[in-house]
Amino acid sequence: MKKTVTTLADGRELIYYDSADDTVRDAVDPRPLDAVSTSSEIRRDPLLGDSVAIASHRQGRTYHPPADECPLCPSREGRHSEIPDTGYDVVVFENRFPSLAGDSGRCEVVCFTSDHDVSFAGLTEEQAGLVLEAWTDRTADLAELPQVAQVFCFENRGAEIGVTLGHPHGQIYGYPFVTPRTEQMFRSMDSHRAETGRNLFDDVVARELAGGERVVLEGEHWVAFVPYAAHWPYEVHLHPRRRVPDLRELDEAARTEFPQIYLELLRRFDRIFGPGEPPTPYISAWHQAPFRAPGREEFALHLELFTIRRTPGKLKFLAGSESGMNVFINDVPPEAAAQRLREVASE
């Protein structure tokens, strides 16, 4: 992998990740851009104890542009985009409309490919492996920033999720705090250790492997399963068999196998609801240990993949119980979801 760091016209950082070591990236961004101005601030909720990012400047962000005006496509034929070059493998740049900025953290955009018309599931294993390298490299770089406590790499796919740009891309958030979901995992992890003397994540994975009814895919270095208490209609957790706290700690064997397992999962997600159905909307989210949290070595890096579609033409809405009290109600039994995801392997 070759990494080339440059800047856009307004001073934002842009990074090319290329498979070929001899690739030259010297294109200059000629756009007359003003410096990015943000109004992001973090406010603490005194009742719940969590944090909310207030970012009013995001109201003006780019919203569903036509394909020939996509800001994530390469710059070609006189049209200049966020990527100055005429093509790229994988590129990462600072978001022009960040939810978190400055002392309040950092937001980046990850473009998986220069091809506007494919999805992540349509990438080759080599391309998916390069995305993994980019996620890992950004995690390592952001870990050096004093204002970043935790890095979250994720992809939102589909208009139903709220995606405003159709180009295949994801995002990376560098939070200035440990997220509430991660804090809850740490509390559960600590309680389990105190009660049993064992690691919670190891026991969860071992239970799923022993039972097998919720296992979707197994590789030599990864295992994917529908969790026992899945919140979403179709939800899969992907764990490396060797527990590590974050992407930086994956060994070469796990890195090599990851594209095979992950691409197969995504392709099965697109087949869940049968032929003729539109692509399945999903959120794919890496859970990594906070950088400076006590006990971080006990945390298990894993990816959570889920869809808000519960059946053809119908979505799972977060209504009263979910949104008001954070108590999820799932209409699809996890065992049935796992069975369906196993069935679609041959469709």
Image: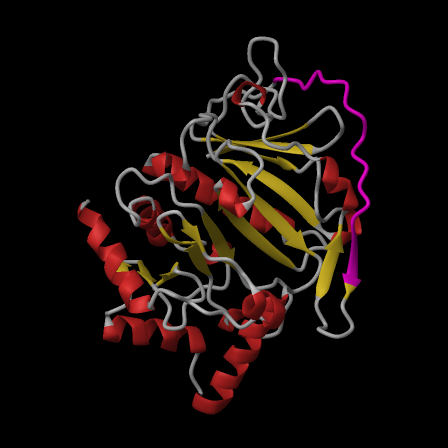
Q: How is the image coloured?
A: secondary structure
The quadrant where residue 235 appears = bottom left
Is 278 displayed left or right of 317 in the figure?
left
Looking at the image, which is closer to me, 347 or 211?
347
Q: Residue at x 71, y 38 (%)?
A: 97
User: x%, y% of residue 47?
Assistant: 75, 75
Residue 212 seen in the figure: yes
User: x%, y% of residue 286?
Assistant: 49, 55
Q: Residue at x 44, y 78 (%)?
A: 200
Q: Residue at x 49, y 69 (%)?
A: 328
Question: In the current view of this chain or complex, which residue is farthest to the bottom?
Answer: 195
Q: Compared with residue 329, is residue 266 higher up or lower down, i.e. above or below?
A: above
Looking at the image, which is closer to me, 246 or 72?
72
Residue 219 seen in the figure: no
Question: Magenta stretch: dominant SS?
Answer: loop
Please count the marks in the image.
0
The magenta segment is 27-43
- Asked whether residue 66 is drawn in magenta, I would say no
Is 83 displayed left or right of 118 in the figure?
right
Question: In the current view of this chain or complex, which residue is farthest to the top?
Answer: 77
Question: In the current view of this chain or complex, which residue is farthest to the left?
Answer: 346
Q: Compared with residue 230, is residue 305 higher up or lower down, i.e. above or below?
A: above
The quadrant where residue 75 appears = top right
Q: Quadrant of the C terminus?
A: top left
Q: Residue at x 70, y 52 (%)?
A: 145
Looking at the image, which is closer to me, 167 or 188?
167
User: x%, y% of residue 152?
Assistant: 57, 54
Q: Compared with residue 253, is residue 112 higher up or lower down, i.e. above or below?
A: above
Looking at the image, which is closer to me, 26 or 106?
106
User: x%, y% of residue 103?
Assistant: 79, 52
